[in-house]
Amino acid sequence: MFIAISLHILAATIWVGGMFFAYSFLRPVAASVLEPPLRLTVWVGVFSKFFNWVWLSIILLIGSGHYMAAQLGGLANVGKHVHIMMLLGYIMVAIFMHVYFAPFKRLKAAVALEDWPVAGNNLNVIRKMVLLNLVLGLITIFIGSAGRYLVV
């Protein structure tokens, strides 16, 4: 069980920490010092690398989460906080998959064509969805770590 929980926490840290870094630090600096063509090209490169880690994180989170629940006798034997954590996690996965298969795909295509307005619009969509997923991720971490101590 210690391997599963360690992988679970590492995967959550990579995914949520990466979003926190990108949204809070990389985005404002890139917007202030890079012209749109370079900024949009940088974001395609950053997302291309980061999203590989997100896919791995998703696999580890789902696999380790269900494994740990099974070790406790199944989902019927875990606390409400675990159900809430899983629900929020699956919502985050759905948002990420939408980002990956829709606006990120369009962003890459627009950058390749040097269509900067279309690329910028798609980056803006991604920015909003990353913020939503970041908030959900922070809430999920809070619930996952402190939920058993909350009286519900």
Image (cartoon, helix red, strand yellow):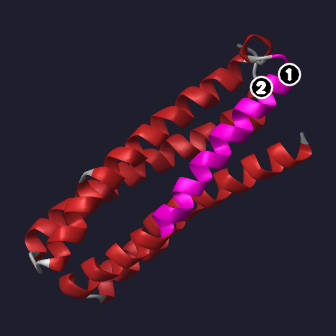
The residue depicted at 63 percent of the width and 60 percent of the height is 14
Q: Quadrant of residue 104?
A: bottom left
Q: Does 53 appear in magenta?
A: yes
The residue depicted at 12 percent of the width and 81 percent of the height is 114
Location of residue 115 with respect to 95 vertically, above or below: below
Q: Are marks 2 and 1 in contact (CB under 8 Å)?
A: yes
Q: Which mark is residue 109?
A: none
Q: Does 60 appear in magenta?
A: yes
Q: Which mark is residue 72?
A: 1
Q: Residue type at mark 1? A: Leu
Compared across the picture, whether 146 is left or right of 121 comes to right
Q: Which one is nearer the viewer's eye here, 8 or 135?
A: 8
Q: What segment is highlighted magenta in the picture? A: 50-73
Q: Which one is nearer the viewer's eye here, 84 or 49?
A: 49
Disc 2 crowd, CA 10 A, few/some/many (<14, 14-19, 20+): some
Q: Which residue is mark 2?
A: 69
